[in-house]
Image (tube, grey):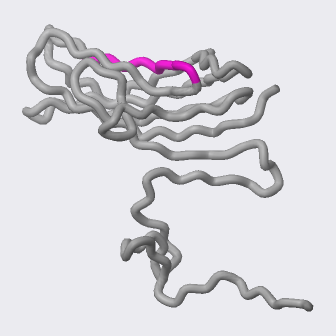
Amino acid sequence: MATTKDKFDSVGGFSIDKTVVVDELRNAKDFNTLEIKNSEFTDSKIVQYILRGLNTAVLQLDTVGSQIPIDNNTLNFITGHVIAVNPSGTVYSEKIESVVSCDNAGQVSVLSSMTTVIKDDIPTGQTWSILPLGATNRFSYSTTRAGTTNTIKWVVSTQIVSIAWQ
């Protein structure tokens, strides 16, 4: 017996547990991460993440220490927009563009990186730095704070373009 399937339709938007994730104007909201795939190239995707941390640390996706997952046998173009700030409002901002590979055993290697400093107001005598960091099937950034006891807050908006690479 034939059945007719209707396209998904939701008047006024779509919600999960009463939290609107797609409004009536087709705006996506309140996602933890967002993955975009092209139906023509199913072996690639783009995912956005927000990483955070304090002082000298490995930046995290959440409060339990999660890092960005990287699939085996992929080549990844990773762009991070970095902001660091101290309690008095001093700002450091940069953009880090990296190429990262992950082999069939999950070993993540940072192949290259280019850094563009956007704003550097770090006080004299202090060091604030950030570097890409690969681990087994994981990626993040390692931050360093030296020469001060002030809390430095780090946030990185990270985009990953991942392509199967066997």
Instruction: Please determine whether, in this image, residue 1 is positioned above or below residue 152.
Output: below
Displayed quadrant of residue 113: top right
Quarter of the picture containing the N terminus is bottom right
At horizontal 47% and vertical 19% (from top left) the residue drawn is 133
Displayed quadrant of residue 85: top left
> Which SS does the magenta portion mostly show?
strand
Query: Is 84 displayed left or right of 81 in the figure?
Result: left
Residue 58, horizontal then vertical, whole percent: 36, 23
Query: Is 135 displayed left or right of 102 in the figure?
Result: left
Residue 14, horizontal then vertical, whole percent: 49, 78
Residues drawn in magenta: 128-136
In depth, the one of 7 and 110 nearer the eye is 7
Find the residue positioned furthest to the right: 1
At horizontal 69% and vertical 53% (from top left) the residue drawn is 37
Residue 151, horizontal then vertical, whole percent: 13, 26
Find the residue positioned furthest to the front: 1
Displayed quadrant of residue 94: top left
At horizontal 27% and vertical 28% (from top left) the residue drawn is 92
In depth, the one of 121 and 27 nearer the eye is 27
Q: How many marks?
A: 0
Magenta stretch holds residue 119: no
Query: Is 30 displayed left or right of 53 in the figure?
Result: right
Residue 96, horizontal then vertical, whole percent: 47, 27
At horizontal 27% and vertical 24% (from top left) the residue drawn is 120
Quarter of the picture containing the C terminus is top right
